[in-house]
Amino acid sequence: MMRSALTLFQKDIRLLLGRGSGLVQALLLGFLLIFLFSLSADMATPTTAKAAAAIFWMASAFCQVLIFNTLYGYEEGQGQRLGLLLGKTPPQAVWLGKGAAALVALLLVQALLLPAIAVFLRQGFVALWPQAILALVLANLGGVGLGSLLGALSQGQGAKESLLSIILFPLLLPLFLMGIFVFAAAFTGEHTQEVGAWLRLAAAFDGTFLGAAYLLFPYIYTAE
Amino acid sequence: MMHTPKNNALRTNYTPFCPWAGILALLGGVALAACQWLIFVYAPVEATLGLPQKIFYLHVPLAWWGMLSFFLTFVASALYLKHGTPRWDMLAESAAEAGLLLAGLALVAGSFWARASWGVWWIWDARLTTTLIMCFTYAGYLIIRRLDMPEMRRNKVAAVVGIVAFLDVPLVYISSRLWSFIHPPSVQLDSDMRLVMWLCVGACSFFWAGLVTLRFSLAATERTLNTLTAQQLAAQSAKE
């Protein structure tokens, strides 16, 4: 299974970076959201750390939806999904390969969104670096695990971006809250005891949904 | 024509209107009406929160039965994925619809209570937030059920979402508690208040069971009609 997953991951990353359109589209949307929200602040009253963290995670969530729709869109035409299954690729390998590709793409996008947060919303990391990085990794892991499961359900559907958003976003709420809390603490430098509790919650989320997605993905991907 | 015994398809698939749905709905209606007397006459007025606390007797049963509905959707979805029997799928859908209705009403009742007691329409309370997120998730679940895709695929996709959605409940609850800045003071119930609350929960159970049974019966009838239509179309195209 790992070999199939790795092959799919390499293929998707090549397509994503080679064609560029999916990644650039996600990035542009992220920048646009951050810029538009920056209009609500002025020189005298800059955006609060919590609001800036919320904008970052919201932009990341929308980027994630675009990335998954691009990744699952590659096998949409000409029965390629069935081709993958007939080639004896374990369905979980598709989930893992797509999830890994989305994780890399999302990290790339976020690496560019963070400077935009610093420029447009006047925020910067002043403390809590390891915890903020851990929060980023945990939130992205859980997000892509669940996103890769649900990304397959919108495959072949009209208005799939909105469909995936309305299913995925409410489920990701615990991760959003964790990300907002930890990033706001990192922007202000105010360390609280609660950061540890949030990180543990995110780890529990990841364990639950990575396990559930692994078990449930074949039902979505192979169903006809 | 629908009841002609010669028609095999009708004999095997047709599910008549379930009389239990009517009986349960009637019982629920009478019991909920009786509860109004208990709420406004029998139960004492709460010392701190005053008259608005009466909303509590409606809010709690709605929220509890809504959440139980979502749990039923979770169980029925898991059983559908395991066995592939359509009745589990229909039960999951019926419970989700009833759950969304009750949870939505619980949110409205909770919002009125918050406004009357704390002066705001919404408070970041863990229970209210969890109910709201469940409403969003199961609204998405019901949208999936109306998607134009092959029936088997749609049912399986919906079952997966039905399972995943319920797994999120404890995590949403804990995260809302962690996030919370203000907690509403917990209501201290005396024995009369507690009795009325449990009677209201019991009364709501009839209403809920009637709703789910009625919706299940409708889903079964809809399924039969779809099968008949497909059979008739197949027979027509074979003739041509």
Image (cartoon, grey):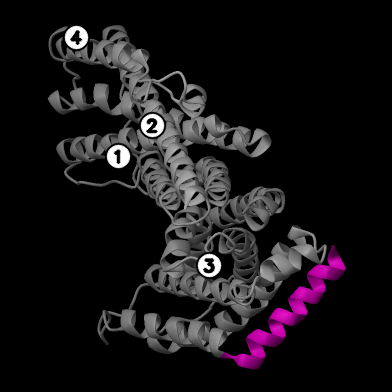
In space, the residues marked 4 and 2 are separated at their CA atoms by 21 Å
- Kind of residue indicated by mark 3: Gly
Q: Which residue is mark 4?
A: B34
Q: Nearer the viewer, residue B187 or A90?
A: A90
Q: Which residues are magenta?
A: A1-20
Instruction: Find residue B138 and report its horizontal and vertical position in percent.
Output: 42, 45
SS at mark 3?
A: loop
Q: Is residue A139 left or right of residue B211?
A: right
In space, the residues marked 3 and 2 are separated at their CA atoms by 32 Å
SS at mark 1?
A: helix
Q: Which numbered disc, 3 or 4, marks the residue closer to the eye? A: 3
Quadrant for the N terminus of chain B in the image = top left
Magenta includes A14?
yes
Q: Earlier in the sequence, mark 1 or mark 4?
A: 4
| Label 2 neighbour load within 10 Å: few <14, some 14-19, many 20+ | many
Q: Which residue is mark 1?
A: B104
In space, the residues marked 1 and 3 are separated at their CA atoms by 31 Å
Residue under the image location 84 percent in, 62 percent down = A1
Q: Which numbered disc, 1 or 3, marks the residue closer to the eye? A: 3
Q: Are marks 3 and 2 in contact (CB under 8 Å)?
A: no
- On what subunit does the disc labeled 4 rest? B
Instruction: Find residue B208 and report its horizontal and vertical position in percent.
Output: 35, 23
- On what subunit does the disc labeled 3 rest? A
SS at mark 2?
A: helix
Q: Which residue is mark 2?
A: B66
- Kind of residue indicated by mark 4: Ala
In space, the residues marked 1 and 4 are separated at their CA atoms by 23 Å
SS at mark 4?
A: helix
Q: Which residue is mark 3?
A: A156
- Kind of residue indicated by mark 2: Gly
